[in-house]
């Protein structure tokens, strides 16, 4: 456990170097962008100095990394506000959407994948394959806009987008969550359905399942005790990966539904070459991936004690 | 089956956490909530302001809000953009044109209750100049700003500067703050203006303003304004149609036609002060040759470009200034004529095919479309255009390094002819990236910059514009329309050519 955490920290340090280098390698001068098209050389120099961009790159990195260790990710070039605060402000919206989407995804994937695996090549199985193919290939912005036009426009059942905190207006919170959660959930769900199907199929073919059947256990018992338990392992992994992906901000969906999450923030930061915000956001995404991986590993060892002892 | 339960528990826990730490909610004073009160205007804008310090930001989404919060000494008239009184009631220039005297209103209070006087003007302008903020270039001619008495401000300039009112009143980047505001307030998140609305709060979803009851021009008729950020135009228009919002400027030109027959939406368009143009790099052959540039200017069918890029929501133009302006110059020597263009190329003695990289940015999608149309129009005369789409930061970098054959972009928010022509075409001008140099144009532009007689000034700019067009320093394409939409029955709002949005007099249906 300790070794595992230590590894993660080393990876994180490496990531911080790469993040910093990559962000600074992207062409485009943030000072020029911040000033717009008309400005004087004096204003350019003044802003460059204020944002520390006149310092050598190596020094910029150590200043940034040193502060990042204390939780201070610097100040946004664009807004002049602390990056940590901006990220924390956006985190609730992203967490809400990511977890809601995972719930939607699992609600779709687990039953659909299991049924498909139990009756391979049946109508249900083929239907599920086609549906998940559609779910993966339909662009999420298109699906989002169609939902908006139908449910907010024609039917008028739901607001067209936006976000309110649960504490402020639970009903409004739920209404605004439905469409973005469905769009992101369908995409993740389509991916997960296939994993569920193949891992249930694989589990079905294993010796102990045949043994269990031969012992005369009821089909339902075999399914829940022997098959699903084994199929769970890959499901945890893929769900973890999907969750990490969703937490890093589903940029397109956040923009279509005016959902003020981290994806939106990161996109704005890229466009404005807002180095501190971009670095902070990417570092956070890396941290999320590492954390989710750690949690997945822990879950693994609970599900399969053999792994824990390794 | 313990594991999945654990996962779901985790989910519930995270949701609960979300609930507790949910973004700072906003009390608008009339019940709170993002829906605002009954008499609050909800305006859908496409992006979040980056910050609220008017002297520091250069972002349009910030100025959409700040327009309603801050005042300047003078303001553009909503119709023809000539300068009229705001915080200054009156102004005059000395005979030598070097001293401007502004008389100020004496009945104005800032949102924090303090009284407005000449010291605030001095403080605000000195802040821009001393800290070398982005707008310092507007004070390039200014030697000093002094308070003569509480209601009189004197500005000394180094040479006659007839466009001084346009420079200090053109937009809210020249806003007047109370003396010492930068020390007392965090101006990136707080605002202390004299305008019709006060800044109440702002987060990642919206910005809320409340009516300022003591506004010198009389309290606004709505209780407040909520600017809601909706990036996706389809979502913004849906929100307008189903009554979630009452106003939006997020209307892409291709929607205009379908909205015209829609009685849930009132549509408004007006020609803007922006212009789009193409320019070539003089340092790269054969584009330093005027005949080649003229051939290109002749081959381009501006009507077709306008139709494709703006769905017709623009005025094709061969000079920079739009027709409604006093400074409009009625000069259009090029007619879309490929044969004549080919002839020009032959006369110039250049070998075709010529290849030309045309740099555009996806930040302004219409430039990409316009470039594609231009590429198809130049192909028949033997010019192979390679349309290079880059993001805006890269675009600006390459422009400043001279790393381009040609590019296509616009100048936005121009008020005075100085804004339209000076820095772009004078030799060594700060925006003369194409490398244009014509001594006669230099002379005309320099004279026009300090000419105080309006008619004489227009004449100088007309002459300069003709030469610029003849030399094809810029190949002008069109002035786009401002397109906005609002709820039927909304009144008291005027759509403006400079895209400033002012909700002072707006009344909800």
Image (tube, helix red, strand yellow):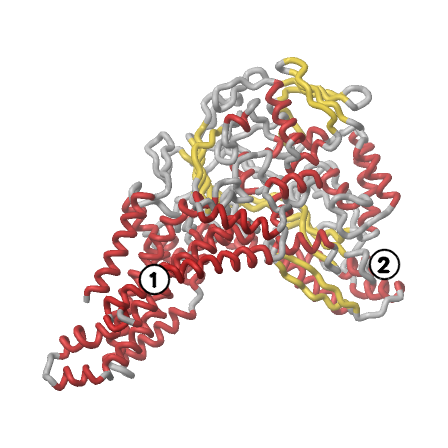
The vertical placement of A4 against B428, above or below, is below
One can see residue A92 in this view: yes
Which residue in the protein does label 2 denote? B289
Are tags 1 and 2 found on a single chain?
no
The image quarter in which residue B426 lies: top right
| Vertical order, B133 against B476 (above or below) | above
Q: Chain of mark 1?
A: A
Question: In front: B207, or B484?
Answer: B207
Q: Quadrant of the N terminus of chain B?
A: bottom left
Q: Nearer the viewer, residue B124 or A254?
A: B124
Q: Position of residue A3 (x, y in %)?
A: 35, 62
**What residue sits right under mark 1 in the picture?**
A294
Residues packed near mark 2 inside 10 Å, few (<14), some (14 to 19) or many (20 plus): some
What SS does tag 1 mark?
Answer: helix
Residue at 79%, 70% in the rendered image:
B353
Q: Is residue B264 visible?
A: no
Q: In whole angstroms, how far apart are the C-alphas of marks 1 and 2?
A: 65 Å
> Residue, x 76% and y 21% (percent of image)?
B99
Classify mark 1: residues with Cα within 10 Å, few (<14), some (14-19) or many (20+): some
Identified at 54% across, 47% down, the residue is A63
Q: Check the residue under mark 2 and report the chain it is in.
A: B
Report the side of B426 relative to A100 (left or right). right
Q: Is residue B320 left or right of residue A66?
A: right
Q: Furthest residue to the front?
A: A3
Q: Secondary structure at mark 2?
A: loop
User: Which residue is depicted at the point 76% across and 67% down?
Assistant: B355
Percent coordinates x, y for residue A282 in the rendering? 47, 55
Q: Quadrant of residue B296?
A: bottom right
Q: Position of residue A31 (x, y in %)?
A: 62, 46
């Amino acid at each position: 456990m300790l070794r595992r955490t230590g590894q993660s920290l080393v990876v994180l340090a490496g990531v911080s170097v790469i993040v910093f280098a990559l962000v600074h390698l992207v062409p485009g001068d943030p000072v020029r962008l911040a000033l717009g098209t008309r400005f004087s050389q004096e204003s350019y120099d003044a802003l460059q100095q204020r944002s520390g961009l006149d310092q050598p790159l190596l020094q910029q990195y150590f200043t940034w990394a040193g502060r990042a260790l204390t939780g201070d990710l610097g100040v946004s070039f664009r807004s002049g506000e602390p990056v940590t605060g901006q990220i924390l402000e956006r985190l609730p919206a992203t967490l809400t959407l990511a977890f809601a989407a995972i719930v939607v995804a699992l609600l779709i994937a687990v039953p659909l994948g299991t049924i498909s695996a139990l009756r391979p090549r049946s109508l249900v199985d083929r239907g599920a394959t086609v549906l998940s193919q559609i779910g993966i290939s339909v662009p999420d912005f298109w699906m989002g806009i169609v939902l908006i036009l139908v449910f907010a426009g024609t039917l008028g059942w739901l607001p067209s987008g936006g976000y309110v905190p649960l504490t402020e207006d639970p009903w409004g919170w739920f209404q605004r969550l439905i469409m973005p959660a469905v769009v992101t959930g369908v995409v993740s769900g389509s991916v997960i359905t296939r994993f569920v199907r193949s891992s249930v199929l694989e589990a079905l073919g294993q010796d102990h399942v045949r043994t269990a059947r031969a012992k005369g256990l009821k089909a339902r018992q075999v399914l829940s005790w022997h098959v699903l338990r084994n199929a769970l392992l890959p499901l945890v992994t893929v769900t973890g990966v999907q969750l990490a992906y969703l937490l890093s901000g589903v940029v397109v969906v956040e923009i279509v539904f005016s959902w003020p999450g981290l994806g939106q923030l990161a996109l704005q930061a890229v466009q404005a070459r807002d180095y501190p915000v971009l670095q902070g956001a990417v570092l956070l995404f890396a941290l999320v991936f590492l954390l989710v991986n750690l949690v997945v590993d822990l879950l693994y060892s609970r599900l399969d004690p053999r792994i824990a002892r390794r | 089956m313990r594991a999945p339960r654990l996962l779901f528990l985790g989910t519930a826990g995270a949701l609960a956490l979300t609930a507790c730490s949910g973004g700072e909610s906003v009390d608008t004073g009339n019940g709170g909530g993002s829906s605002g009160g009954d008499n609050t205007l909800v305006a859908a804008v496409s992006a979040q302001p980056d910050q609220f310090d008017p002297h520091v930001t250069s972002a349009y989404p910030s100025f959409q809000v700040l327009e309603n919060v801050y005042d300047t000494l003078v303001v553009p008239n909503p119709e023809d953009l000539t300068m009229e009184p705001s915080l200054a009631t009156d102004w005059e220039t000395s005979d030598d044109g070097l001293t401007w005297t502004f008389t100020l209103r004496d009945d104005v209070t800032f949102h924090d209750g303090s009284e407005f006087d000449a010291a605030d003007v001095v403080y605000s302008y000195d802040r821009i100049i001393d800290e070398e903020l982005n707008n310092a270039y507007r004070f390039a001619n200014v030697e000093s700003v002094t308070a003569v008495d509480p209601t009189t401000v004197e500005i000394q300039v180094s040479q006659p500067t007839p466009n001084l009112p346009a420079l200090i009143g053109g937009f809210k980047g020249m806003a007047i703050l109370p003396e010492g505001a930068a020390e007392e307030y965090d101006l990136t998140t707080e605002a202390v203006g004299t305008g019709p609305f006060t800044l109440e709060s702002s987060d990642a979803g919206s910005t809320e303003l409340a009516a300022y009851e003591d506004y010198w021009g009389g309290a606004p008729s709505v209780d407040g304004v909520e600017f809601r950020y909706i990036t996706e135009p389809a979502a913004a228009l849906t929100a307008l149609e189903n009554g979630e919002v009452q106003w939006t400027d997020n209307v892409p030109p291709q929607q205009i036609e379908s909205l015209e027959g829609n009685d849930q939406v009132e549509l408004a368009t007006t020609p803007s002060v922006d212009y789009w143009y193409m320019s070539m790099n003089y340092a790269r052959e054969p584009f330093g040759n005027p005949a080649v540039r003229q051939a290109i200017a002749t081959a381009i069918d501006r009507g077709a470009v306008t139709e494709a890029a703006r769905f017709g929501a623009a005025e094709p133009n061969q000079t920079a200034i739009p027709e409604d302006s006093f400074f409009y110059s009625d000069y259009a020597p090029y007619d879309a004529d490929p044969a004549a263009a080919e002839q020009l190329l032959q006369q110039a003695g250049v070998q075709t095919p010529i290849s030309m990289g045309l740099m555009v940015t996806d930040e302004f999608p219409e430039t990409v479309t316009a470039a594609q149309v231009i590429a198809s129009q130049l192909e028949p005369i033997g010019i192979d255009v390679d349309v290079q789409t880059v993001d805006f930061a890269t675009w600006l970098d390459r422009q400043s390094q001279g790393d381009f054959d040609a590019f296509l972009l616009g100048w936005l928010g121009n008020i005075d002819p100085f804004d339209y022509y000076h820095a772009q075409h004078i030799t060594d001008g700060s925006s003369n990236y194409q490398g244009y140099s014509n001594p006669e144009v230099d002379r005309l532009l320099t004279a026009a910059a300090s000419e105080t007689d309006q008619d004489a000034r227009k004449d100088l700019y007309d002459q300069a514009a003709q030469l610029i067009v003849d030399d094809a320093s810029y190949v002008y394409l069109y002035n786009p329309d401002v397109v906005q939409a609002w709820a039927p029955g909304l009144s008291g709002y005027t759509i403006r050519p400079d895209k400033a949005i002012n909700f002072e007099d707006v009344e909800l249906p």
